[in-house]
Image: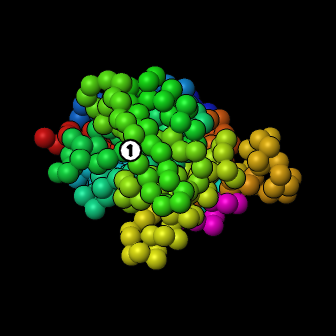
Amino acid sequence: MANDVKFEGKDRRIEKIEQFLAQNDLGSLEACRELCLSKGVDVDAIVKGVQPIAFENAVWAYTLGVALALKRGVTDAAEASAVIGEGLQAFCVPGSVAEQRKVGLGHGNLGKMLLSEETGCFAFLAGHESFAAAEGAIGIARTANKVRKTPLRVILNGLGKDAAYIISRINGFTYVETSYDFHADKLKIVEEKAFSDGERAKVKCYGANDVLEGVAIMQHESVEVSITGNSTNPTRFQHLVAGTYKKWAIENGKKYFSVASGGGTGRTLHPDNVAAGPASYGLTDSMGRMHGDAQFAGSSSVPAHVEMMGLIGMGNNPMVGATVACAVAVQESFK
């Protein structure tokens, strides 16, 4: 067995990875890469194309997952996504938060949902605090609709109209300006402005002034699946919107799957999180447990922090885009 490749935290992972390789008759990580490339799937280009600062262990985790899907002959992108999650799970450090929460499998299953026709709209909730949500959204917009019969609608819904405008302009999204009537509890679409043509313009970016407007945006877009950003506004916006929308969805028979992108140790320097006390995983993590159907681990954006939680070096939001893109590449390789 070779496995001479170098990646971050290899010593903590390699025994588990080698067991997984043996169980699935995949030989080595080098053999996995060769299998992917032989089928025309350049995993390194896909992963780094979504988040250029992703770690090498992210590339190898996706390489393992894609190789497994190819070896099993999985021709459907949604099913391939779930299999890719097995590869991500194999890279979770034994005993870590990521392993305990089965975050690798969770990412695979989230990608499967987004590639399923049952999901009409996916929201990055509070995606304005960094460009990571934009990276994830672009990854999905580029690829998901290649294999779906009905296009998946992707939105960003965050706190602040100026932030939404800037994110839209830089990334070529469509900025949707809204106003909210508190007395009538009604959302009004003031203007839609596309900053590009093509796939990026299909991503709609909303900025809300408060929680109620954020919930109204979720209702307007009929969001079925969302993932929260985990800073900078966990106590002011995203968890409150997700929780309030979930209550409304339950009361009205609306299907809604809420993913809390993470939190965890090391995320405690932000004032919102410091307020939760030094013993907590950070308030964003604690609040995520209140509404999340699934909870990931680590930052929505920062690779090093997700790595700290024992997963791989890639932000949770970009990872959603990478999972979908890799799964679509698997399906297309069989054409």
Q: Nearer the viewer, residue 6 or 124?
A: 124
Residue 332 x %, y %: 20, 40
Which colouring convention does the figure follow?
rainbow
Residue under the point 43% across and 52% down: 187
Residue indicated by mark 1: 189
Element type at marker 1?
strand
Amino acid under label 1?
Answer: Ile
Residue 193 x %, y %: 35, 30
> Secondary structure of the magenta portion, mostly?
helix
Residue under the point 21% across and 41% down: 146
Residue 259 x %, y %: 51, 57
Answer whether residue 269 is visible to the viewer in this image: yes
- Give the residues drawn in magenta, as a range: 286-293
Residue under the point 53% across and 36% down: 161
Q: Nearer the viewer, residue 98 or 214?
A: 214
The C terminus, quarter of image: top left
Residue under the point 37% across and 53% down: 221
